[in-house]
Amino acid sequence: MHQYRSHTCGALRDTDNGSQVKLSGWVHRKRDHGNLVFIDLRDHYGITQCVIENTDPNFKVIEHVRPETVLCLDGEVVLRDAEAINENLPTGKIEIKISKAEVLSESDVLPILVASDEKFPEDLRIKHRYIDLRREKLQSNIKMRDQITRFIRQQMWGQEFNEISTPMLTSSSPEGARDFVVPSRHAHGGFYALPQSPQQFKQLLMIGGFDKYFQIAPCFRDEDLRADRLLVHYQLDVEMSFVERDDVMNTMEKVLYSVYDKFKGDRKIDSNIPRIPYSEAMETYGIDRPDLRNPLLIKDVSESFKDSGFGLFAGLVAKGFHVKAIATPGTADRPRSFYDKLNDWARSEGAGGLGYIIFGTDGEAKGPIAKNLDADRIAAIKEISGANDGDSVFFVCDKLHDAQKFAGKVRIKLGQELDLIDPNEFKFCWVIDFPFYEVNDEGKLDFGHNPFSAPRGGLAAFEEQDPLKIFSEQYDFICNGFELGGGSIRNSNPKVMLKAFEKVGYGEDVVKQKFGALYEAFQYGAPPHGGMGCGLERTVMLLTGEPNLREVEAFPLNGRGQDLMMNAPAELSEEQLRELHIKVRPTHKS
Ligand code: ASP
């Protein structure tokens, strides 16, 4: 027989009754029933109950073992008595009568428990991740991640994409985050950057004659940490040559939809995947990644407040502000506290408050705003917002973009408060037609997404259009309010590239310095190309139902970007620093 096992701990069934077997695994639970001791032995595949009498000579071997000790047990498969059958366990009809026991590796007292639903502090879990990984939830999350990755690869290979690895030690490739840098020992004062994405390499692969590339690529982004951000994430990274926008979108929509369809379990999935222009997304949902499970819609009712008796809004509308309205069905009979709570929330978000009109079931419009509006205006608001008797309508008034954004937050808040969002459903959409440029916080023209996207209309667009009216060939794929991925048809014409940078105040020198290889490559025959990057962890997170990306990562950093298990980041020795020609500055005390 094999030294460690004839079967895994998930394999044996009642049909194996009478077989002599050998199992190895961890002591999941040990139960002492007087003259009998039960050991639930666990491995990656399952749990098998093993039993020994305290008079058996082997009993001494396991008498004092702690949970999570690794044992190798020989024995005979026997059927359990009818009342001892465990229907929840695939091996629940049998047990092993232990005839030989060996301790392969002892466990000390555990810092976190495995056979328990108890919650442990995240830092403790991360420090002892190898124990945490044994717990059922993490085992299943990481297995699910493997299944999803495998399925994605099969989809891509099935469509003749080539999987190609791109370099990790490279130069900066901006995706809007800071770079992680690696000092070079050989080049005095030189630094590599870890790639924020394989963007430039995948474009260079297209120029290098490949037609369909993909990779499940690590992306390193030194960002401020939040529950929905990782310093390193993996993405399904894709690029295709001689394609139009719809080619990439159709290809990737099929792949992403099929992943959710395969792993959705008993959750619902909507196969209707609308393509929503950015301006419409902002107008109707107040966000560029709308959660379409939320049925509430934002409407513009500025006209109804223009020159109206409600002086506050009338004055602001006269200044060019907009009033946005959200009708909420069946809320008219909510107590006053419902409105007060929402008002307090709006203030905590920095707004002046949240105005509303309540349409009673008798059709009467109530509230301070309604008192100051004439009947025609109230009727118009009711109609535009889509409200009925028994509903209430909430208002936001601000400059257009701010009004849209805050109305977007109100829509989400109301959706949650009114329990309108089905947690067991996946709804997707694309957002398209993003503006190529935006005005940044300093009031300067800047790229709306990344500088790799093509402007719609090419060179002529810059000559004929207001820069803020130019569309980018960018598209984002959204699920339940999360951005699952984004990409674009690339700006592969060097003249267009120069013009695009010129508008934001950069000359050829900056283009050459920042995107030298790509810019040069564009001079030697570049096929039109486009692609996309889709975050893997976010999809695994949504499919496992986890609230935090770190729960789908085998070895995550903690919320402060530390690896407490391996002790990183750590200081370097003086010798290492010297080799790297680095002197660490003391912390600046302010
Ligand atoms: N490089 C982009 C990103 O990482 C994806 C793409 O445009 O293909 O977000």
Image: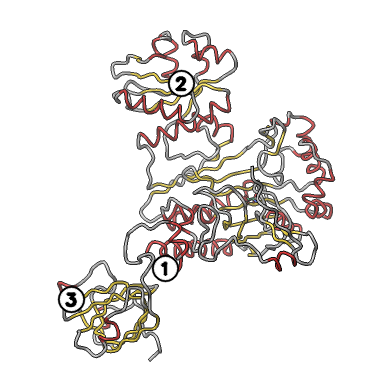
Which quadrant is the N terminus positioned in?
Answer: bottom left
To which residue does mark 2 refer?
384
To which residue does mark 3 refer?
33
- Residue 35 drawn at (x, y percent): 16, 81
Is tag 3's residue or tag 1's residue first in the polypeptide sequence? 3
* Mark 1: secondary structure: helix
Residue at x-position 67% and y-position 34%: 440
Whether residue 28 is situated above or below residue 480 in the rendered picture? below
Is tag 2's residue or tag 1's residue first in the polypeptide sequence? 1
Local packing at callout 1 (Cα closer than 10 Å; few below 14, some 14-19, many 20+) is some
Question: For the residues marked 2 and 1, what is the alpha-carbon distance in whole angstroms?
Answer: 57 Å
Residue at x-position 47% and y-position 40%: 291
Instruction: Please name whichever residue, 115 or 586, is drawn nearer the observer in this view of the structure.
Output: 586
- Residue 485 drawn at (x, y percent): 57, 49
Q: Amino acid at mark 1?
A: Ile
Residue at x-position 53% and y-position 28%: 404
- Residue 255 drawn at (x, y percent): 53, 55
Instruction: Please name whichever residue, 440 or 497, is drawn nearer the observer in this view of the structure.
Output: 440
Whether residue 134 is situated above or below residue 17 in the rendered picture? above
Question: For the residues marked 3 and 1, what is the alpha-carbon distance in whole angstroms?
Answer: 27 Å
To which residue does mark 1 refer?
131
Model colouring: secondary structure
